[in-house]
Amino acid sequence: MTIDALSYFENKLAHETDASDVYTAQKAGEDFVLVDVRGDDAWRQGRIRGAVHLPHQRIAAEAGALIDVATPVVVYCWSPGCNGGAKGAAAFARLGYAVKEMIGGYEYWVREGQPTVDDTGELPRVFDPQVMVVRP
């Protein structure tokens, strides 16, 4: 079976987003819940400001009590080398949520200098010239 390029990329974009687009959506006040699907230790180490913590293994049992099924969800894990985001997105999709995976995960969020926090408060923002244009 041959899949044409336009269909492939439109389908891909319907199910994924990236750190820059999520940050823009947050600033615009768009209605969605950002879900960190990493484990407890990772959550404590640092997370995206405004995210909800729900490890992917617990989504089936706990999502319905935390997030209205009518609310769109964006999930993230560690990095492009982690498939926890895909596992989390699949778990939300099984429950009937509109869900996207944030490609690049927490790693690219941090590398792009977006706001992060831990249990003590705001973490330093770092802008990585390997993944974005950095202006003085």
Image (tube, grey):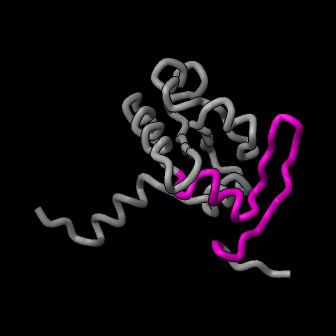
Quadrant in which the N terminus appears: bottom left
* Residue nearer the viewer, 48 or 73: 48
| Among the 4 quarters of the image, the one containing residue 113 | bottom right
Give how far across and how far down residue 55 sits, in percent. 56, 30
Q: Is residue 84 magenta?
A: no
Residue located 86% across and 56% down the image? 124
Give how far across and how far down residue 93 sits, in percent. 40, 36
Magenta stretch, residue numbers:
102-131
Q: Is residue 122 magenta?
A: yes
Residue located 49% across and 53% down the image? 81
Residue located 53% across and 25% down the image? 63
Could you tell whether 128 is left or right of 70 in the image? right
Residue located 61% across and 32% down the image? 39
Give how far across and how far down residue 103 sits, in percent. 52, 56
Give how far across and how far down residue 116 sits, in percent. 77, 49
Numbered label tally: 0
* Residue nearer the viewer, 31 or 21: 21
Please determine whether, in this image, residue 26 is positioned above or below residue 134.
above
Please determine whether, in this image, residue 73 is positioned above or below residue 41.
below
Q: Hey, which residue is sitting farthest left in the picture?
A: 1
Please determine whether, in this image, residue 37 is positioned above or below residue 68.
below
